[in-house]
Amino acid sequence: ERKSVRRLSSQRLLLPASLLAFPTMSASSPAVLASADGAAAPAPLGFAASASQAWQSASVSMSDPLVQQQALEGATLRAAAAFAAYPIDVLKTQVQAGHPRYCNLRAAPKLFADYKMTVFRGYPGVGANSFLMGAMMFGGYRFFDNFWRLQGVPDYWRPAVAGASIGAICGLTAAPLEQVKTVMALQESWLKEGRINQRIFSSVGHGAWASSFKLKFYAAAPLMCRTALFDCQLFFYNSRLRDYLDKEGHNYSQNSKLFIGTFGFMFAGLLGATINYPFDLVKGRMMAEAYMVQTGQVPKSSMFGTFSRVLRESGAIGLFRGLPTRSALHAMVWCVVGVGREACERSGIRDGAKKRSAEKGHNQKLTA
């Protein structure tokens, strides 16, 4: 009898899909282990099986016209928000690089006066990255949400794990254009100061084509850490906010829910941007020196080397140099995105997508 129990406990059994409590999963069922007392306990699938099943489920989810509509909205809103906040982004780059004239948020009028319209010269890189990452987040988050569900990650923590996973990939994808944007943000002041004789990149397209692989990915590591940590927190905080509004939303008026949803989303972004700021500072420092490293004017540094140098020169407080500038940047970005999301919902722009989604039998309650 004990031998038969041991054999039973070592076998993998498949449950029918109808018994699974995961509505967003595909029809394929995860394996479970049968325990000695007869209870069925879920067992994580292997990497390849989980990835295949998560991909299928994400593909089904992304075929929903409403999800596609929201993905397009999210990508467009992020690109528009990045444009509105781009001059502050250029100032943040200068602050992190340690420029003596553009040293804090109060220097914004000086930078605008000096740069004039050239301040937007590097925006196409940020706009393209914002649109790309906004689009990637929808499908990517769904893939990792299903993948980590199959690996047994609890519902409470899974938004954080899935957010960190897609955030790291987005950071790697964004590195080349982010590097080009940084050089273009700094080259105007370098030109005025005589550090260079002509602009390094005449446009974002020129920079993306002409820059070397090493230059493009010189600061990829801190950028990946920054975006992974940021999206980990953003998805986690947002899921907790959604859960709260689902349970307690009947106690609030529509306008109150709009306020809580929009500014709660913005606050989540600000909190995430504050916690991960040391990685953003190191990323900014490394990207600011990347061109000089490639031309042999300054020695090469790693992420850990740059962390050490900042701590050695300025102490722990130095890791937060320029934080008010980034906070202002994110307040603008997430306010535009948050208000834009509510405007899309209330304006009826999604009605056609909702109708097509219902006709295809998709669930109207989105999870991401």
Image (cartoon, grey):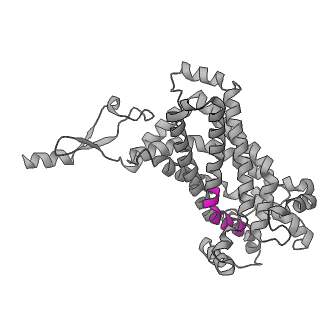
Task: Say if residue 251 shows up in the picture.
Answer: yes
Instruction: Give the residue drawn at x 60%, y 20%.
Output: 355
Q: How many marks?
A: 0
Q: In which quarter of the image is residue 351?
A: top right
Compare residues 300 and 208 and report the one nearer the observer.
300
Instruction: Provide residue 326's location: percent of width, then percent of height.
Output: 72, 58
Magenta stretch: residue 281 in it? yes
Instruction: Give the residue drawn at x 56%, y 29%.
Output: 64
Instruction: Give the residue drawn at x 65%, y 81%.
Output: 312
User: Overall secondary structure of the magenta stretch?
Assistant: helix
Q: Does 151 appear above or below 187?
A: above
Instruction: Provide residue 54's location: percent of width, then percent of height.
Output: 45, 41
Compare residues 335 and 21 and report the one nearer the observer.
335
The magenta segment: 272-287
Compare residues 50 and 37 and report the one nearer the observer.
37
Instruction: Give the residue drawn at x 34%, y 40%.
Output: 30
Q: Quadrant of residue 222?
A: bottom right
Instruction: Provide residue 206's location: percent of width, then percent of height.
Output: 81, 56
Give left or right: position of 118 versus 88: right
Q: Does 160 appear above or below 106?
A: above
